[in-house]
Amino acid sequence: MTTEKFSTYSYLLDRTNRKIKQYAQNKFKEENFDITVDQWLILKNLSLHNDQNQSQLAELTGKDHPTLTRILDLLCKKNLVERRASEGDRRSFIIHLTEYGIQKQNEWAPKVSEIRTKAWENLSEKDYEDLKRILNTIYQTLS
Amino acid sequence: MTTEKFSTYSYLLDRTNRKIKQYAQNKFKEENFDITVDQWLILKNLSLHNDQNQSQLAELTGKDHPTLTRILDLLCKKNLVERRASEGDRRSFIIHLTEYGIQKQNEWAPKVSEIRTKAWENLSEKDYEDLKRILNTIYQTLS
DNA sequence: TAATTATATTTGTCATACTAACTATTAATA
DNA sequence: TATTAATAGTTAGTATGACAAATATAATTA
């Protein structure tokens, strides 16, 4: 590909990413979900794979370790999650979705899906597949 | 579109956006470009439209006002940019790319384009057009 | 087994983003 | 014209993200 022509995608991607996050966050606020969209990502992943240690959870969610540490601090404060000692390894914690966390996750999940789906109302299933393919290709190319 | 199926795009978009930024930032560092990718966006825009006030520049670059204020503080410190009093309106500043800023912008631009183009080496021109269309559609749908 | 290396997590620092509140100035209107 | 509303920009607080360095513990190896 010739250079220079391809200078705007990073701007569009960043801008759209922020818009999506901002849109979801505002809806969360309207619905009185006391959580950020990044915190939701962690909660959602724990609902599928509870009791991971932080390294595994960081891998699953694509967050780096310091960021995950801080998000978990906040989720712990809200009693949605707790850090449990790991049996075999005293360095690591098992991240456990609490009863309250499970309850809230179940309560919020349908509305979150609805909010997320909004972005696609003017696009096709093929667009969805194309976007996933393109983003994954870029990710791998730069990794 | 049915809900729930469309839950991963926001994760992929966020993850890819971070990868792109991180890749470019690392290359900037390798090249000893003393600038962040977000600061570069402002510089690039000023090279096309010099002497905008901050509101216009915020609009052009998709940054909000507080963020732009802080990025400009840093660019001013590096003498790449200066805030000039506006003739007609004492509330606003004209953001001026300095001689040094113009020089650095010209110096860095070709390599930046090259770095940005890397992401597309396994994708087609059609993919590029599709991505732009999809991102713009999402942006407008959520605006 | 003592020393070295690797892993899990945290802390610190800086940059970016969003919201809200604030100052200064300008525009609108009663 | 005096009051009110709108606009330009900054400041403050909180969250996230990148990177480096620190701590504690585990695994490897000399």
Image (cartoon, coloured by chain):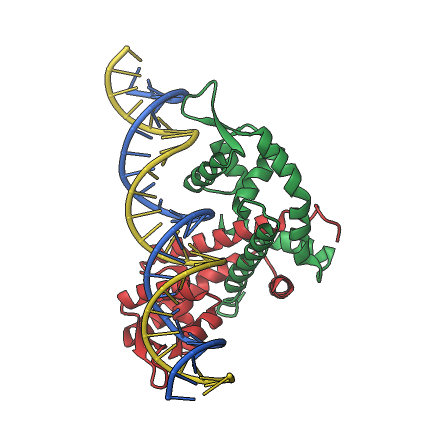
Chain colours: A red, B green, C blue, D yellow
Name which residue lies at 36% across and 86% down. A88
For the question of whether residue B97 can be seen, the reply is: yes
Q: Position of residue B112 (x, y in %)?
A: 64, 47
Q: Is A3 placed above or below A135 here?
A: above
Query: Viewed as shown, does residue A100 lie left or right of A41?
Result: left
Name which residue lies at 61% across and 33% down. B102
Name which residue lies at 53% across and 47% down. B36
Q: Position of residue A102 (x, y in %)?
A: 33, 75
For the question of whether residue A78 can be seen, the reply is: no
* Most foreground residue, B127 or D26: D26
Quadrant in the rendering for residue D25: bottom left
Q: Position of residue B67 (x, y in %)?
A: 44, 42
**Quadrant including the N terminus of chain B:** bottom right
Q: Position of residue C11 (x, y in %)?
A: 32, 61
Q: How many marks?
A: 0
Name which residue lies at 54% across and 39% down. B42
* Most foreground residue, B51 or B32: B32
* Most foreground residue, A112 or A84: A84
Q: Is A131 placed above or below B109 here?
A: below
